[in-house]
Amino acid sequence: MSIKQLIIQFIEDNGPKFGGQIEDHIRSIMGAKASNASRRCRELVEDGVLERELCQIEGVGNKVVKYKIKKVDALSGIPSYRPEVLKQRIFEQSQKSLI
């Protein structure tokens, strides 16, 4: 699996994440440098897959970057890039409406 695929999977499975969290995750799985993960995140933003948002955290002087999935399914309104994740989320939503 490529670093880009791992980043997409990590964000889809865990929701929007800060750049440092993504770097730590990629480093722990692949042993890649943090700068490599940051570069791949920027490329995913350029490709239109991810969205980046600058956030101010209390007690921290500088703003930090949070990444989230940009692509949204038109039918469900669920952000997803991988079809299997979208299918599972649509199924979960339909089950909630049956209860």
Image (tube, rainbow, N blue to C red):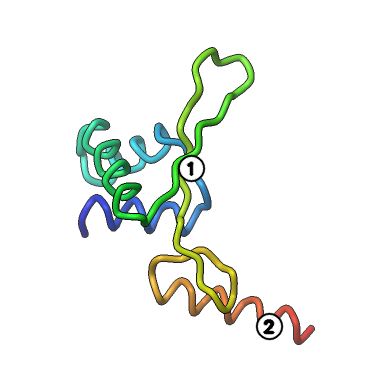
Placement of 45 over or under 91, stated as above or below: above
Helix, strand or loop at mark 2: helix
Q: Residue furthest right?
A: 99
x, y percentage for residue 21?
42, 36
Q: Which residue is mark 2?
A: 95
Q: Residue furthest bottom?
A: 98
Placement of 12 over or under 39, stated as above or below: below
Q: Residue at x 76, y 87 (%)?
A: 98
Q: Amino acid at mark 2?
A: Gln
- Position of 78 with respect to 65 (left or right) is right
- Cα distance in 3D space between marks 2 and 1: 27 Å
Helix, strand or loop at mark 1: strand
x, y percentage for residue 4?
27, 53
| Quadrant of the drawing holding the N terminus | bottom left
In front: label 2 or label 1 = 1
Residue 5 lies in what quarter of the image?
bottom left
Residue 78 lies in what quarter of the image?
bottom right
- Position of 57 with respect to 26 (left or right) is right
Q: Residue at x 25, y 38 (%)?
A: 39
Q: Which residue is mark 1?
A: 17
